[in-house]
Every structure is written in C-alpha cells, then in structure tokens.
C-alpha cells in the first residue's frame, strides 16, 4: 500500500534528506512533491521553511494469524543418504559469479584519440587535486571507455554521478573539437556506472510492478538522457507496461504507464 509523510526543512533538499533519513529509504524508492518552497525572508528574518510530501510503498498489513492447532504434525525426517548413494549422486554445480569487467568488451587503446583523452583527463584531475590515472580502452563499436583508477574518487563521481557526467562531457568536447568524425567517450570511476545501472533497473522493475498492481501511470523523478535510456531498456519487454518521457531538460521525466496487453 502507498503511504506518505510530510517534512519541512530550511531548503527543499534538506526536507527531502530529513524524510529519507526518517524512512530509511533511498531517493529512487520514493516520490517527492514540493508543497511549499522555502522563502529566505528579509535579512534572514521572517523566512519560511520548505515543505515536501514524500510518498512511498509500504508492505500490506499481514492478516492476523490463525490460532495454533492443538497438535502440530511433525514433518518426516529426510532419509539418510548412504555413502554409496553420496558417491553416485552428482555434485551440485556452483554458479560461477560473473567478473565485474569493463563497460563493454574492449581492448586497450593507444591511438591519437586515446592519447588526447589521457592527456586531457590527467591535466583536469591534477587541477581538481585528485590522485587518479585514466586507463583508456576502445570497444567493438569504436567507443572510448575510460576507467579512472585511484583512491577517494567520491569527489570525481559527485552526487548521483553529476560530476562524472560533467567530466565526461568536457572530455568529449576536447577530443572531438576540430575533428571531422566524432567519437563517444564514456568515463567511469570505482564501477559507479554499472552499480547505478543495476540500481536503476531494480527501481524500474519495482515501478512497473506498482503500475500494474494499481493500474495507473507512475512518473519518476527527473533523470538525464543516459539514466532514462537505462529505464526504457529495462522495461521494453515488461508485460502490460510502456514507457515514455515528458518535460524539458533538465527536468525531463519518464512515465511508466499501465498498458494492458503490451509486450504479451
């Protein structure tokens, strides 16, 4: 079932943070509606706090348990396996976990574009006072993949990857400037992008389940083009659900729509 709480804070973000801390949930697990914007007042006097409404999905209340029966039957014990049977029985197959490899199948790159990417990022990271080394590779489609290797790369990633996206955009401009053909540059640090993709895919499935269960459309919070692509891809075969985007950048959102018969 859906529940909501209302919280106030000095700013909208402070109110949201207070609500998430109180609920113990992540931002992508809730829907936020701003009820009142924060007003600073004059010289810090007479201001009003921001007020927000946070809606979240709570588990349905379990029905009352039936009183225990007078006598509970005891399950029969599992048969004891003899040594001969144990030898004859096939050993259980352990699933080998997939290694956390690069973003795509790729090989180290040592061409002029790769050198330009490495030089630009090395200079940028030095100015940011970040101890990291760019490792450049190229995938089968000719995209350049960069993994920043170092310590304490949180400042490079930023809130929800915003700093990492900005670095990626700047690097793309620097590499493609004055070139007749453009290449795509994708930058990652500490495996953030793969982790973020997994988080977005989980959120997409939860949202689709909610849309089907309540037979209504669900609008997600604003996302960049890359994150919207992950959501669209994750739900492109989900039954009874379709997705589309609304709004203008940077507030463009995805709508997960209830669509009976879709993808069946």
Image (cartoon, helix red, strand yellow):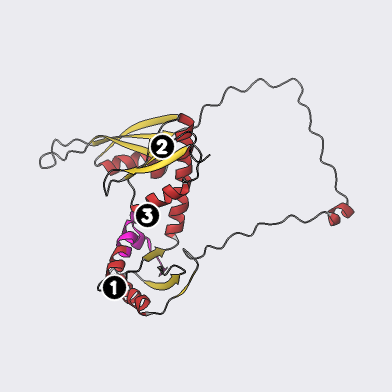
Residue plotted at (50% across, 67% down): 105
Horizontal arrangement in the rendering, residue 14 relative to residue 89 (left or right):
left
From what the image shows, is residue 236 above or below residue 115? above
Q: Label 1 crowding class (10 Å Cα cut-off): few <14, some 14-19, many 20+?
A: few
Q: How far apart are marks 1 and 3 (CA)?
A: 25 Å
Q: Name the residue under label 2.
A: 257
Q: Name the residue under label 1.
A: 180
Residue plotted at (32% across, 76% down): 116
Q: Label 3 crowding class (10 Å Cα cut-off): few <14, some 14-19, many 20+?
A: few
Is residue 225 on the magenta stretch?
no
**Observer-nearest residue: 83 or 213?**
213
Residue plotted at (33% across, 57% down): 158
The answer to whether any part of residue 96 appears in the image is yes
Circles 1 and 3: CB distance less than 8 Å? no
Circles 3 and 2: CB distance less than 8 Å? no
Q: Is mark 3 on a helix, strand or loop?
A: helix
- Magenta region: 145-168
Residue 153, how many percent across, how many down?
38, 64
Quadrant position of residue 221: top left
* Of pointers 1 and 2, the one earlier in the residue sequence: 1
Q: Label 2 crowding class (10 Å Cα cut-off): few <14, some 14-19, many 20+?
A: many
Horizontal arrangement in the rendering, residue 225 relative to residue 95 (left or right):
left
Circles 1 and 2: CB distance less than 8 Å? no
Q: Mark 3 points at which residue?
A: 226
């Amino acid at each position: 079932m859906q529940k909501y709480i209302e919280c106030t804070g000095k700013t909208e973000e402070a109110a949201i943070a207070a609500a998430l801390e109180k609920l113990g949930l992540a931002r992508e697990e809730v829907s936020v509606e701003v009820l009142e914007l924060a007003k600073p007042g004059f010289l810090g006097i007479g201001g009003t706090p921001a007020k927000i409404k946070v809606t979240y999905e709570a588990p349905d209340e379990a029905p009352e348990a039936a009183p225990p029966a007078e006598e509970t039957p005891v399950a029969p014990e599992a048969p004891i396996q003899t040594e001969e049977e144990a030898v004859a029985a096939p050993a259980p197959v352990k699933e080998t976990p997939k290694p956390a490899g690069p973003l795509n199948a790729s090989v180290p790159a040592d061409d002029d574009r790769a050198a330009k990417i490495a030089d630009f990022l090395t200079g940028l990271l030095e100015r940011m006072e970040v101890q990291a080394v760019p490792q450049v590779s190229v995938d089968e489609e000719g995209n350049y993949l960069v993994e920043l290797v170092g310590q304490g790369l949180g400042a490079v990633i930023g809130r929800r990857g915003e700093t990492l996206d900005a670095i990626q955009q700047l690097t793309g401009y620097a590499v493609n400037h004055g070139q007749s053909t453009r290449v795509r540059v994708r930058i990652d640090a500490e495996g953030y992008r793969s982790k973020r993709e997994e988080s977005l895919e989980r959120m997409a499935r939860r949202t689709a389940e909610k849309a089907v269960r309540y037979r209504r459309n669900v609008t997600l919070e604003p996302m960049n083009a890359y994150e919207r692509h992950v959501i669209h891809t994750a739900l492109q075969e989900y039954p009874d659900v379709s997705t589309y985007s609304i709004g203008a950048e940077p507030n463009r959102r995805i709508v997960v729509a209830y669509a009976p018969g879709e993808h069946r």
